[in-house]
Amino acid sequence: MFKNPDKAPKQYTPGEALQKIAAFCAYQERNHKEVEQKLKSYGLDEDEAGEIIIRLSREKLLDEQRFAQAFVRGHYRQKKWGRRRIVQELKQKGISEYCIKAGLKEIDGEEYYQNLVEVMEKKDRQEKEKNPRVRRMKISQYLTGKGYEQDLIKMALDDLGKVPEEDE
Protein backbone atom coordinates (compact mmCIF):
# COMPACT_ATOMS: atom_id res chain seq x y z
CA MET A 1 0.00 0.00 0.00
CA PHE A 2 1.47 3.38 -0.98
CA LYS A 3 1.43 6.40 1.28
CA ASN A 4 -0.24 9.44 -0.21
CA PRO A 5 2.21 12.38 -0.13
CA ASP A 6 -0.70 14.88 -0.10
CA LYS A 7 -2.21 13.33 3.02
CA ALA A 8 -1.00 14.77 6.36
CA PRO A 9 0.44 12.23 8.84
CA LYS A 10 -2.00 11.02 11.49
CA GLN A 11 -2.01 13.08 14.66
CA TYR A 12 -2.14 11.20 17.96
CA THR A 13 -3.15 12.25 21.44
CA PRO A 14 -0.44 11.82 24.08
CA GLY A 15 -2.24 8.71 25.38
CA GLU A 16 -2.43 7.09 21.95
CA ALA A 17 1.17 8.07 21.22
CA LEU A 18 2.33 6.51 24.50
CA GLN A 19 0.72 3.17 23.58
CA LYS A 20 2.20 3.22 20.07
CA ILE A 21 5.67 4.26 21.20
CA ALA A 22 5.68 1.70 24.03
CA ALA A 23 5.10 -1.03 21.44
CA PHE A 24 7.80 0.56 19.26
CA CYS A 25 10.28 0.37 22.16
CA ALA A 26 9.23 -3.13 23.22
CA TYR A 27 9.91 -4.49 19.73
CA GLN A 28 13.64 -3.70 19.89
CA GLU A 29 16.05 -1.48 21.80
CA ARG A 30 15.68 2.18 20.85
CA ASN A 31 17.55 5.36 21.74
CA HIS A 32 16.11 8.69 22.88
CA LYS A 33 16.79 10.44 19.57
CA GLU A 34 14.90 7.76 17.60
CA VAL A 35 11.93 7.85 19.97
CA GLU A 36 11.85 11.65 19.97
CA GLN A 37 11.74 11.73 16.15
CA LYS A 38 8.96 9.16 16.11
CA LEU A 39 6.92 11.14 18.65
CA LYS A 40 7.34 14.32 16.60
CA SER A 41 6.06 12.44 13.56
CA TYR A 42 2.96 11.63 15.66
CA GLY A 43 2.34 15.37 15.96
CA LEU A 44 3.36 15.83 19.58
CA ASP A 45 5.19 18.94 20.77
CA GLU A 46 8.52 18.81 22.63
CA ASP A 47 6.99 18.97 26.11
CA GLU A 48 4.59 16.09 25.46
CA ALA A 49 7.37 14.06 23.81
CA GLY A 50 9.69 14.76 26.76
CA GLU A 51 7.12 13.59 29.27
CA ILE A 52 6.57 10.35 27.34
CA ILE A 53 10.33 9.74 27.06
CA ILE A 54 10.71 10.22 30.83
CA ARG A 55 7.87 7.81 31.48
CA LEU A 56 9.35 5.20 29.09
CA SER A 57 12.71 5.54 30.85
CA ARG A 58 11.12 5.09 34.28
CA GLU A 59 9.28 2.00 33.05
CA LYS A 60 12.57 0.64 31.65
CA LEU A 61 11.26 0.53 28.07
CA LEU A 62 13.88 3.06 27.02
CA ASP A 63 17.45 2.70 28.26
CA GLU A 64 20.41 4.28 26.44
CA GLN A 65 22.99 2.02 28.08
CA ARG A 66 21.04 -1.12 27.20
CA PHE A 67 20.63 0.23 23.65
CA ALA A 68 24.40 0.80 23.36
CA GLN A 69 25.16 -2.71 24.64
CA ALA A 70 22.72 -4.32 22.21
CA PHE A 71 24.02 -2.18 19.33
CA VAL A 72 27.63 -3.15 20.07
CA ARG A 73 26.81 -6.87 20.40
CA GLY A 74 24.86 -6.93 17.16
CA HIS A 75 27.28 -4.91 15.08
CA TYR A 76 30.48 -6.58 16.16
CA ARG A 77 29.05 -10.11 15.99
CA GLN A 78 26.78 -9.88 12.94
CA LYS A 79 28.27 -7.12 10.80
CA LYS A 80 31.79 -7.68 12.18
CA TRP A 81 32.43 -3.96 12.64
CA GLY A 82 35.45 -2.65 14.50
CA ARG A 83 35.38 -0.51 17.65
CA ARG A 84 36.03 2.76 15.83
CA ARG A 85 33.07 2.32 13.46
CA ILE A 86 30.77 1.28 16.31
CA VAL A 87 31.77 4.32 18.40
CA GLN A 88 31.24 6.61 15.41
CA GLU A 89 27.75 5.22 14.75
CA LEU A 90 26.75 5.47 18.42
CA LYS A 91 27.92 9.09 18.56
CA GLN A 92 25.83 9.84 15.46
CA LYS A 93 22.83 8.39 17.29
CA GLY A 94 23.43 10.81 20.16
CA ILE A 95 24.55 8.24 22.72
CA SER A 96 26.57 9.56 25.69
CA GLU A 97 30.26 8.71 26.20
CA TYR A 98 29.37 6.84 29.40
CA CYS A 99 26.88 4.60 27.58
CA ILE A 100 29.30 4.06 24.68
CA LYS A 101 32.01 2.89 27.11
CA ALA A 102 29.52 0.58 28.81
CA GLY A 103 28.51 -0.81 25.42
CA LEU A 104 32.11 -1.43 24.35
CA LYS A 105 32.57 -3.68 27.39
CA GLU A 106 30.41 -6.20 25.49
CA ILE A 107 33.32 -6.84 23.10
CA ASP A 108 35.41 -9.92 23.85
CA GLY A 109 39.03 -9.31 22.79
CA GLU A 110 39.68 -12.76 21.34
CA GLU A 111 36.39 -12.89 19.45
CA TYR A 112 37.03 -9.36 18.18
CA TYR A 113 40.46 -10.30 16.80
CA GLN A 114 38.98 -13.49 15.30
CA ASN A 115 36.33 -11.34 13.54
CA LEU A 116 39.10 -9.15 12.14
CA VAL A 117 40.97 -12.21 10.84
CA GLU A 118 37.80 -13.66 9.27
CA VAL A 119 36.94 -10.36 7.55
CA MET A 120 40.54 -9.99 6.37
CA GLU A 121 40.73 -13.55 4.99
CA LYS A 122 37.42 -13.14 3.17
CA LYS A 123 38.62 -9.85 1.63
CA ASP A 124 41.94 -11.51 0.74
CA ARG A 125 40.10 -14.27 -1.16
CA GLN A 126 38.01 -11.68 -3.05
CA GLU A 127 40.87 -9.28 -3.83
CA LYS A 128 42.03 -9.51 -7.45
CA GLU A 129 45.17 -7.36 -7.04
CA LYS A 130 48.36 -9.38 -7.69
CA ASN A 131 50.99 -6.90 -6.44
CA PRO A 132 51.52 -7.91 -2.76
CA ARG A 133 52.17 -4.35 -1.52
CA VAL A 134 49.08 -2.89 -3.26
CA ARG A 135 47.01 -5.91 -2.19
CA ARG A 136 48.04 -5.41 1.45
CA MET A 137 47.20 -1.71 1.22
CA LYS A 138 43.75 -2.40 -0.24
CA ILE A 139 42.95 -4.96 2.46
CA SER A 140 44.19 -2.54 5.12
CA GLN A 141 41.98 0.27 3.77
CA TYR A 142 38.97 -2.05 3.72
CA LEU A 143 39.56 -3.08 7.35
CA THR A 144 40.02 0.55 8.37
CA GLY A 145 36.64 1.30 6.78
CA LYS A 146 35.12 -1.50 8.86
CA GLY A 147 36.42 0.33 11.94
CA TYR A 148 39.36 -1.79 13.04
CA GLU A 149 42.40 -0.24 14.69
CA GLN A 150 45.64 0.12 12.69
CA ASP A 151 47.81 -1.85 15.14
CA LEU A 152 45.43 -4.83 15.00
CA ILE A 153 45.21 -4.63 11.20
CA LYS A 154 49.00 -4.63 10.90
CA MET A 155 49.29 -7.58 13.30
CA ALA A 156 46.63 -9.56 11.39
CA LEU A 157 48.20 -8.76 8.00
CA ASP A 158 51.61 -9.84 9.30
CA ASP A 159 50.04 -13.10 10.52
CA LEU A 160 48.39 -13.58 7.11
CA GLY A 161 51.75 -13.02 5.41
CA LYS A 162 53.41 -15.70 7.57
CA VAL A 163 50.93 -18.47 6.68
CA PRO A 164 52.21 -19.24 3.12
CA GLU A 165 55.87 -19.25 4.31
CA GLU A 166 55.15 -21.87 7.00
CA ASP A 167 53.39 -24.16 4.49
CA GLU A 168 56.36 -24.26 2.07
Image (tube, rainbow, N blue to C red):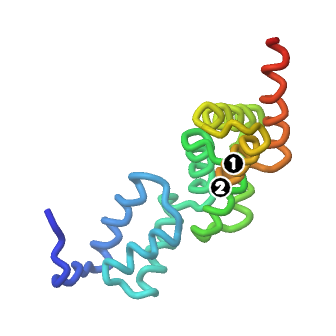
Give the quadrant of the C terminus: top right
Q: Is residue 33 above or below residue 111?
A: below
Label 1: few (<14), some or many (≥20) within 10 Å?
A: many
Residue lying at 31% horizontally and 78% vertically, measured from the top left = 42
Label 2, secondary structure: give it: helix
**Label drawn at residue 82:** 1
Q: Amino acid at mark 2?
A: Ile
Q: Amino acid at mark 1?
A: Gly
Drawn side of residue 51 relative to residue 9, left or right = right
Seen from the viewer's position, the closer of residues 22 and 27 is 27
Which labelled disc corresponds to residue 86? 2
Q: Quadrant of residue 167?
A: top right
Residue 55 vs 65, above or below: the answer is below
Q: Residues within 10 Å of mark 2 (few under 14, many from 20)?
A: many
**Res 103 visible:** no
Residue 125 vs residue 47: left or right? right
The kind of secondary structure element at disc 1 is loop
Residue most toward the top? 168
Numbered mark located on residue 131 in the image: none
Residue drawn at 34 percent across, 78 percent down: 41
